[in-house]
């Protein structure tokens, strides 16, 4: 247990789990945390794969990577060495291309090249594989599933997509299969099959119901495209459903760690609390809460504004002192407010006995290796320590 205390909660996860997921609502710092966790694992000598959907452009550039690329990119070891990654550690970053992953899945499941092409060229497929809600989430997991036993990596970090609702992620496989294998579509297929092409009006009505779920698709010959797609996809369905079930099961596996990311914002906290409860209801539990962008405790009290200005070499004129005092006062209020908001996370932390690690808010966005390295150290101190 002493070794575990020295490693800190995230250090422990990096040693014991193969997959770490960062989950949370929009903009809280999932991508940043995923990159920082990946760096922390590489610093421990792990060969790390970081799977992301929306790599921050500037962060990717500062890692010497081409932002748009969807190939696996190995971060230059000399860059990594500068932030404490030993020679045996490595960091590979891969951007998940939703459509390419879906195409790969169809290719793998289709019984013949001809059937594969009929699906890939279908208008509805093109829509589903790029725009249907849940596709991005599902394909991220598909990719994870495909790579989870890849011997080239010791640890895989999966950054989840910018959904507004963190729960969408866990439900994505069922939702995607459900959207395509819905009673509306079954009925639609039956109607088409029994009517030939005679009663398209009737069919059009059911298509309207269907489209409510799928979003708006227009274009000539659309109904025929829908019919064609459904027939083809039905042939793959056994395989696809099985696959979605397997992906779902893998996500709930013991070697997956859930890192729930939030900011002190009450809405973001509410979201991770929901997610934690959802995990609990499925017999799982979150592995760590990462509270990002916490206003730092104020190093200077507002009444010391004049001294602060003098130390910075500025003229402590009464007007400037007053301005500085107000700024310090605001900062102190923000810090207090953040800590008050974070109290709403405490009952969940205590009930589920989940460790919580905080990361301060930085003066600017996190886009270089130095800032990433700092967050990485906060999350998982390289030489022991229990984290923040
Ligand atoms: N601790 C921090 N201090 C300052 N800026 C931060 C911090 N953490 C993240 N950021 C910045 O906040 C922005 C959002 O972070 P990030 O992209 O990691 O969030 P996200 O949860 O992945 O968002 P999305 O839901 O859109 O995918 C980025 O510009 C990032 O650089
Ligand atoms: Mg992101």
Image: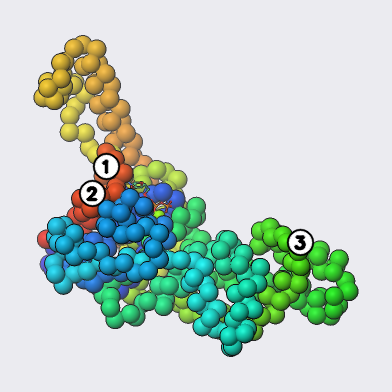
Q: Up-down: is 26 above or below 170?
A: above
Name the residue tied to disc 2: 371
Within the displayed image, which quadrant is ligand 2 positioned in? bottom left
Q: Up-down: is 199 above or below 161?
A: below
Q: Residues within 10 Å of mark 2 (few under 14, many from 20)?
A: some
Left or right: 76 as drawn, with respect to 57? left
Of the two numbered discs 1 and 2 in the rendering, the one whose residue sits closer to the viewer:
2
Q: Up-down: is 381 above or below 255?
A: above
Colour option used: rainbow
Residue 85: where, in percent of width, then height? 16, 63
Can residue 352 be seen here? The reply is no
Q: Residue at x 74, y 74 (%)?
A: 227
Q: Earlier in the sequence, mark 1 or mark 2?
A: 1
Left or right: 111 as drawn, with respect to 198? left
Q: Residues within 10 Å of mark 3 (few under 14, many from 20)?
A: some
Residue 132: where, in percent of width, then height? 59, 62
Q: Secondary structure at mark 3?
A: helix
Name the residue tied to disc 1: 362
Residue 313: where, in percent of width, then height? 12, 22
Find the distance from the CA under tag 1 to the CA under tag 2. 8 Å
Find the distance from the CA under tag 3 to the CA under tag 1. 49 Å
Which residue is most to the top? 318
Q: Which mark is residue 208?
A: 3
Q: Is mark 1 within 8 Å of ligand 1?
A: yes
Q: Residue at x 38, y 49 (%)?
A: 28
């Amino acid at each position: 247990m002493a070794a575990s205390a020295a490693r800190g909660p995230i250090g422990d996860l990096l040693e014991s789990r193969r997959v770490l997921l960062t989950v949370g609502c929009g903009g809280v710092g999932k991508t940043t945390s995923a990159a920082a966790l990946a760096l922390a694992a590489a610093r421990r000598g792990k060969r790390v794969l970081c799977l992301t959907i929306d790599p921050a452009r500037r962060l990717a550039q500062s890692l010497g990577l081409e932002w748009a690329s969807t190939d696996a990119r190995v971060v230059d070891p000399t860059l990594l060495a500068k932030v404490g990654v030993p020679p045996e550690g490595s960091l590979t970053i891969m951007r998940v291309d939703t459509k390419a992953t879906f195409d790969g899945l169809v290719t793998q499941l289709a019984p013949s090249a001809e059937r594969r092409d009929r699906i890939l060229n279908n208008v509805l497929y093109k829509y589903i594989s790029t725009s249907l809600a849940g596709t991005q989430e599902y394909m991220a997991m598909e990719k994870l599933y495909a790579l989870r036993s890849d011997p080239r990596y010791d640890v895989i970090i999966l950054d989840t997509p910018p959904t507004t609702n963190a729960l969408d992620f866990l439900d994505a496989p069922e939702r995607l299969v459900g959207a395509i294998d819905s009673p509306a579509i079954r009925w639609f297929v039956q109607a088409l099959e029994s009517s030939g092409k005679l009663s398209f009006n009737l069919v059009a009505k059911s298509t309207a119901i269907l489209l409510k779920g799928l979003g708006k698709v227009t274009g000539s010959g659309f109904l025929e495209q829908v019919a064609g797609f459904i027939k083809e996809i039905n042939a793959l369905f056994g395989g696809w459903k099985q696959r979605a079930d397997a992906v779902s099961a893998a996500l709930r596996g013991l070697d997956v760690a859930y890192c729930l990311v939030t900011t002190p914002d009450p809405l973001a906290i509410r979201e991770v609390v929901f997610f934690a409860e959802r995990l609990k209801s499925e017999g799982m539990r979150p592995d760590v809460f990462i509270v990002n962008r916490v206003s730092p405790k104020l190093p200077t009290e507002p009444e010391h504004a004049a001294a602060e200005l003098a130390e910075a070499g500025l003229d402590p004129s009464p007007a400037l002192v007053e301005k500085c005092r107000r700024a310090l006062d605001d900062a102190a209020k923000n810090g207090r407010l953040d800590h008050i908001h974070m109290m709403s996370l405490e009952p969940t932390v205590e009930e589920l006995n989940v460790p919580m690690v905080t990361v301060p808010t930085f003066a600017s966005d996190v886009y270089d290796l130095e800032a990433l390295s700092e967050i990485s150290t906060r999350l998982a101190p390289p030489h022991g320590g229990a984290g923040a």
